[in-house]
Amino acid sequence: LPEKERSELKRRKLLLEVTLKSYWIRKGNAFSTAVARQETELTPEMIATGSWRQRPFKPYNFAALGLPLACGHLHPLLKVRSQIRQIFLEMG
């Protein structure tokens, strides 16, 4: 349809445009039906025998965040004080 007719039909809500996307999936060069287990640690035995050269290693993720540190606790007297304050607030 010409652009003018198409915009007129859209304005009158008689035309609905739909975008379809399709993908073609093919087997690549590294395709395999078996999942290869990647190594995560380099052991002294691997270095001694030289087997580390033939094994695939999992890449490092340097952007990953570590575990949060478990630090910063309230002093026991501050805990008691906040509990007593909460009790008085509930009593009015």
Image (cartoon, rainbow, N blue to C red):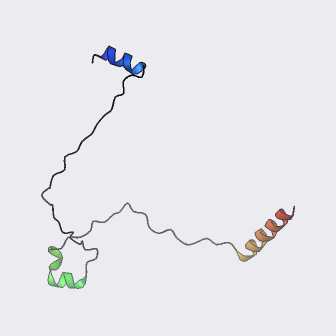
Considering the image in quadrants, where does the C terminus appear? bottom right
Check the image and report above or below for 65 versus 13: below
Identify the residue shown where x is 42% and y is 22%.
13
Q: Position of residue 53 (x, y in %)?
A: 15, 74
Q: Is residue 49 left or right of residue 78?
A: left
Q: Position of residue 65 (x, y in %)?
A: 43, 63
Check the image and report above or below for 39 versus 25: below
Q: Position of residue 88 (x, y in %)?
A: 85, 66
Check the image and report above or below for 6 versus 35: above
Q: Given the current orientation, which residue lies at the most extreme front position?
A: 14
Task: Between residue 83 and residue 12, name the one nearer to us.
Answer: 12
Q: Is residue 62 left or right of residue 89?
A: left
Task: Between residue 86 and residue 33, name the one nearer to us.
Answer: 33
Please tell me how many numbered marks the rendered image carries: 0
Check the image and report above or below for 79 versus 48: above
Q: Is residue 8 left or right of residue 36?
A: right
Q: Position of residue 91 (x, y in %)?
A: 86, 64
Q: Quadrant of residue 19?
A: top left
Considering the image in quadrants, where does the N terminus appear? top left
Identify the residue shown where x is 38% and y is 16%.
8
Q: Given the current orientation, which residue lies at the most extreme left position?
A: 29
Q: Main secondary structure of the magenta part?
A: loop
Q: Is residue 22 left or right of residue 16?
A: left
Identify the residue shown where x is 82% and y is 68%.
87
Magenta span contains residue 58: no
Identify the residue shown where x is 33% and y is 19%.
6
Task: Give the residues in magenta.
Answer: 15-28
Q: Given the current orientation, which residue lies at the most extreme top position?
A: 4
Q: Quadrant of residue 58?
A: bottom left
